[in-house]
Image: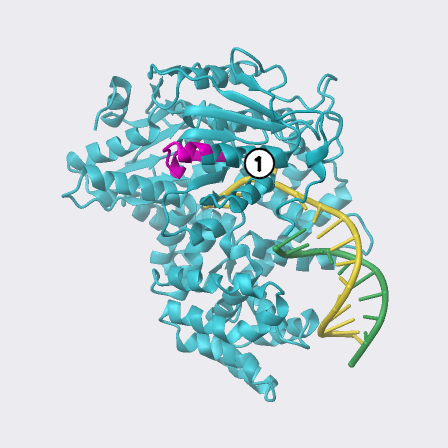
Chain colours: A cyan, B yellow, C green
Amino acid sequence: MELNNQQKAAAEYDGGHVLVIAGAGTGKTRTLIARAAHLIQNGIKPYRILLLTFTRRASKEMINRLEEILPDRETSVSAGTFHHFCLYTMRRMPKLFGLENATIIDRDDQLQLMKLIRGKHRKKGEQFPSAAELVNLGSYARNTLQPMEKYISENTDYDWSIIDRICQIQKDFDTRKKQNNYLDYDDILFLFSKHLHENPDVREKLRGYYDHILVDEMQDTNPLQWLVLDGLRDPAKLFCVGDDAQSIYAFRGADFQNIHSFTSRVPNSTILRLEKNYRSTQGILDLSNWLLHKSTINYNKNLEAVRKTQSTPGLHDFNSDIEEARWVAKDLIERHENGSRWDEHMIITRTGYGARAVESSMIEKKIPYRFIGGMSFLQAAHVKDIFALVRAAASHHDELSWARYLTLWPKIGDVTAARLIEEIKKLNSVHDAVSFIEDKFVKREIIPYGLRIVLKHWNDPPNAIKNAAKFLEPVMMKKYDNWNTRKYDFNLLERLAKEHRSLVAFIETYILDPISTASVKLLEEDDVVTLTTVHSAKGTEAPVCYVIRAEPNMYPHSRSLGNEDSEEEERRILYVAITRAQDELILTRSLRFNNNLSFYGGSTDSHSEGGSGYFLEELGEPLVEANTQGFSNSFSDYDVIQPWRR
DNA sequence: GAAGCGTTATACTAT
DNA sequence: ATAACGCTTC
């Protein structure tokens, strides 16, 4: 593999711990792979290298590329996300961590559980933080290692009376999780890190496992994740790669400044830099540099292209998001007809919701695409129904799943289900629970029968899913009026299940790394346009990138207004979006709703102080080629039928 | 008292 | 598309 001097110095560094500060497009991934290959070639056993990435997608890609350059060797490097790594390490030694029958729960389950608890604490008609906010507050406090009380009092305007109650709710939430043997995302890291730091046996054992720990996207690790890394180092050496200008996970507790304190936090460590951009043309980088230079923060970044080809980003204005979407589809088709592959194009959106119009246009024009980061396949109500049945059969402590399964049946509502679950929790096993339900519903034996079916196929995931779906079909047919479009999803689910030996592992895999509906449907097709959120686009690139809805209230997003740090993070989000482009960058926006009106009610008058602070307000030539052809005073197109309202 | 139905509000990023 | 909410029915 060819490397430049800086990349080579990093890949072959033979000292203590290292932080590699690498700007966008400077060959971060390439250097990480080269580092792993270098270590293996010098006699390090692959399984003694731990590679932590942010998504499973990234770890898969790195392993594949590593196998390409080291074809004849054993290349099974230990790789995964922080959550994946922690969970599976604990699963391998369940007794050490006291984790034998844990069920992993996702955000939806957290919300569900929180709603139950909030309901008990809230007085009727009272304004009180939503379940989602309560979950967020708790999660943020844990990920930043702060006491709830301190975090809420310093960062919200709630009275002490409310704060006390929020803290009590959090305690109840934790208790409820323990009763149900639930582990949420934070618990996985928290439990792992707790044992790592408090139990010397665990610590010695784990520290002996690895010689080198390679970490991607270091700027997005939060204090809790840092605790995990910190406990694993020495003798293992850290090799962390990151870019402060690409830190976009503050909402999850990451602090872009953590990059700057690396050498003080880690004794015997060095900073190396990668500075040459291989990805983009200078025109794209000029715009990126301009964006960062307008910040009050000095990122000390000035990207310079190695590539000699020139291109100026385009800026296209439209009357509405619908016109904008149609133009993007039309432009894609033109490029495809001129010989480009679909997969050379990436459409980047700030929010999943903001991509709706574009998605409709793609469907309408039959452009193949996959959506990364949108609504997860598992979040669809009908898939959750199947999973509830499977999970209920896995654990009689899993109250959320039992509640969902039981309330699918007529005449069983929340209250009846809750009563039954109270009894079920006192039993000793799932089998006792099923027998109990059989006794309770002697005249409705179909209700326990579903559980029997799943248990019968327990060691055969695809058949368990197939039979569970078949069993629930009459119920779901009644529940969903668009059943015909939903039912095909179960074939896909069955196919996914084939790759797993146990039902629990199957479900866990997709809770830890959800897969979007569109990408499941396109498992076999690979020449597709990628539609992605900025957050999911991190680490990827494409020859042609459309940054859609690059308008006021999106960059910065209206929800961030008023908080300087949040607005600054929005700048980095836009920076990440535009630095994905290799050959061509196309910014599109519709100003129609934004000149005087706002989506969320805040003032968008960008000329007043503390206004929208729109990042592209003063953007013009020569940084971009402005195109206002699509923008007119004609309102005629606005009342056209909106394609997604079919 | 509990279930079930119809109406309405809501929509940022993610392991 | 989905969940919360209020109202009616059993």
Q: Is residue A202 left or right of residue A580?
A: left
Tell whether position A591 is magenta.
no
Q: Is residue A121 left or right of residue A511?
A: right
Q: Is residue A194 left or right of residue A318?
A: left
In the displayed structure, A553 sits above or below A394; it is: above
Splitting the image into 4 quarters, where does residue A354 fall?
top right
Circle 1 packing at 10 Å, graded few (<14), some (14-19), many (20+), is many
Residue, far bottom: A443
The residue positioned 33% from the left and 16% from the top of the image is A306
The residue positioned 46% from the left and 47% from the top of the image is A189
Decide which of A330, A266 is in the foreground and name it.
A330
The residue positioned 43% from the left and 24% from the top of the image is A584
Q: Percent position (x, y) of residue A587?
A: 53, 26
Q: Which residue is mark 1?
A: A325
In the displayed structure, A235 sits above or below B7; it is: above
In the displayed structure, A194 sits above or below A406; it is: above
Quadrant of the snapshot with the N terminus of chain A: top left
The residue positioned 34% from the left and 42% from the top of the image is A59
How many numbered circles does the render carry? 1
Q: Percent position (x, y) of residue A7?
A: 28, 23
Amino acid tagged 1:
Ala
Decide which of A491, A496 is in the foreground and name it.
A491
Q: Is residue A167 visible to us here?
A: yes
Decide which of A307, A316 is in the foreground and name it.
A316
Q: Is residue A539 visible to us here?
A: no
Q: Is residue A92 left or right of residue A220?
A: left
Q: Percent position (x, y) of residue A62?
A: 30, 39
Secondary structure of the residue carrying tag 1 is: helix
Q: Percent position (x, y) of residue A60?
A: 33, 44
What is the magenta range? A334-348
Q: Chain of mark 1?
A: A
